[in-house]
Image (cartoon, grey):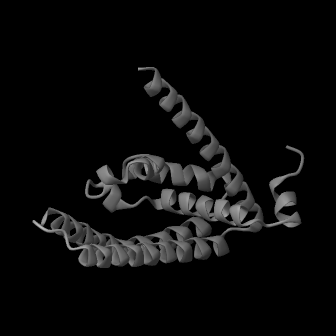
Amino acid sequence: MGQSFRGRAAAHVSPRGVRLMLVGLLVAGAAAVSVPAWSQGGESHRMGGHHAMHGGGMGDGMRMGERMLDAVNATDAQRAQIKQIMQAARDDLKAQRDANRGLRERSLQIFAAPTVDAAQAESVRQQMIAQHDASSRRMLQAMLDASRVLTPEQRAKLAERVKERTARMQEHMQRHQGDAARK
């Protein structure tokens, strides 16, 4: 590979690199404390890969988050701060998930009507986009808050771990797709 992650980051920070870091922080932060709503039924069956990415149930996600924090040698104070940050984000995002559920129900009503109203469908779509944007902004804020708790070295190590995990997941998915294609 040649250069280390830090060496590449110092030489040039690409938008892809920034996204990778943000995804890494999101995965680590969400995994650190898991999202109870996802692990208690509600959204979990609709979350598909995202739910699976966080280890399934709440206990699994919490253990994965602890392993990530162990890997970067997070202190007890850092763990407590990150848990508090992620809990606040979970609380905020629960209300947004509830609003999204209402929009999904509304879109199904529009689709099931005798005549589909394109203007109403577009209105609901725009509202869904706005909700997604609000959720994304809230998670970004949580990730930025968590990034201030970790040292630059811890963040670099975490990003490398997430990158390795992502590569393993992609390999697994490709093998799975290959197996499915052969059937």
Q: Name the residue: 60% across, 52% down.
A: 68
Of 64 and 171, nearer the camera is 171
Q: Name the residue: 61% across, 38% down.
A: 168
Instruction: Name the quarter where the C terminus is drawn.
Output: top left
Instruction: Name the quarter where the N terminus is drawn.
Output: top right
Q: Name the residue: 73% across, 68% down.
A: 151
Q: Is 142 on the left or on the right of 160, as rendered?
A: left
Q: Is 95 on the left or on the right of 8, as rendered?
A: left
Residue 37 in percent (x, y) is at 31, 61
Q: Is 66 on the left or on the right of 114, as rendered?
A: right
Number of marks in the rendered image: 0
The answer to whether 46 is drawn above or below residue 132 in the figure is above
Residue 101 in percent (x, y) is at 26, 68
Q: Which residue is at the far left?
A: 114
The answer to whether 98 is drawn above or below residue 7 in the figure is below
Of 56 and 136, nearer the camera is 136
Residue 124 in percent (x, y) is at 29, 75
Q: Quadrant of residue 111?
A: bottom left
Residue 166 in percent (x, y) is at 60, 46
Of 104 and 34, nearer the camera is 104
Q: Which residue is at the far top?
A: 183
Q: Quadrant of residue 106?
A: bottom left
Of 104 and 17, nearer the camera is 104
